Amino acid sequence: MNKRGVTVLPKTAEILEQMGEHIKLARLRRRLSAELVAERAGISRATLWNVEKGSPSVAIGIYAAVLHALGNMDTDFLLIAKDDELGRTLQDLELPVRRRAPKK
């Protein structure tokens, strides 16, 4: 466990590492320095380094800021859970939804 106490499953850690690598490659393809991207994102170079490593202790808002600093790539967040097949299947089955008792 790291200093912030964030625990992620191994598969999730792999996904974060891949995402960090993709962010780093996007920065390098654009020939942008780490200093410039960090400045544009409003973070330190050390935090950018953690993003590029795929650290789970970095807030998702910082990932979004870095993606925005790379050229408005933060719109890719709109793709998250866009095609929720399981959720749609459950909805289609009209499974009962647990509801709270009405307030008195």
Image: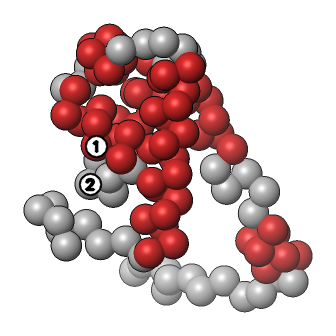
Residue contact between numbered discs 2 and 1, judged by CB atoms under 8 Å: yes
Q: Is residue 69 above or below residue 104?
A: above
Q: Position of residue 45 (x, y in %)?
A: 22, 26
Q: Quadrant of the C terminus?
A: bottom left
User: Closest to the observer: 95 or 36?
Assistant: 36
Q: Residue at x 45, y 54 (%)?
A: 17
Secondary structure at badge 2 equals: loop
The answer to whether residue 55 is left or right of residue 24 is left
Amino acid type, residue under disc 2 in the picture: Ser
Residue at the image point whose x is 30% and y is 32% from the top: 48
Residue at the (33%, 57%) spot, across then down? 56
Question: Are there few (<14), some (14-19), or many (20+) residues within 10 Å of tag 2?
Answer: some
- Residue type marked 1: Asn
Image coords of residue 19 (percent x, y): 51, 47
**Label 1 CA crowd tier, 10 Å (few <14, some 14–19, many 20+):** some
Secondary element under disc 1, as helix, strand or loop, is helix
The quadrant where residue 30 appears: top right
Viewer-side residue, 98 vs 75: 75
Q: From the viewer's perspective, is 55 left or right of 93? A: left
In the rendered image, which quarter is residue 7 located in? bottom left
Distance from label 2 to label 1 (Cα)? 8 Å
- 40, 17: nearer the viewer: 17
Lower sequence index among marks 2 and 1: 1
Residue 44 in sight? yes
Question: What residue does disc 1 label?
Answer: 50
- Residue 72, placed above or below residue 76: above
Q: In the current view of this chain or complex, which residue is farthest to the right? A: 92
Q: Which residue is mark 2?
A: 57
Which residue is painted at 78% across and 57% down in the image? 83
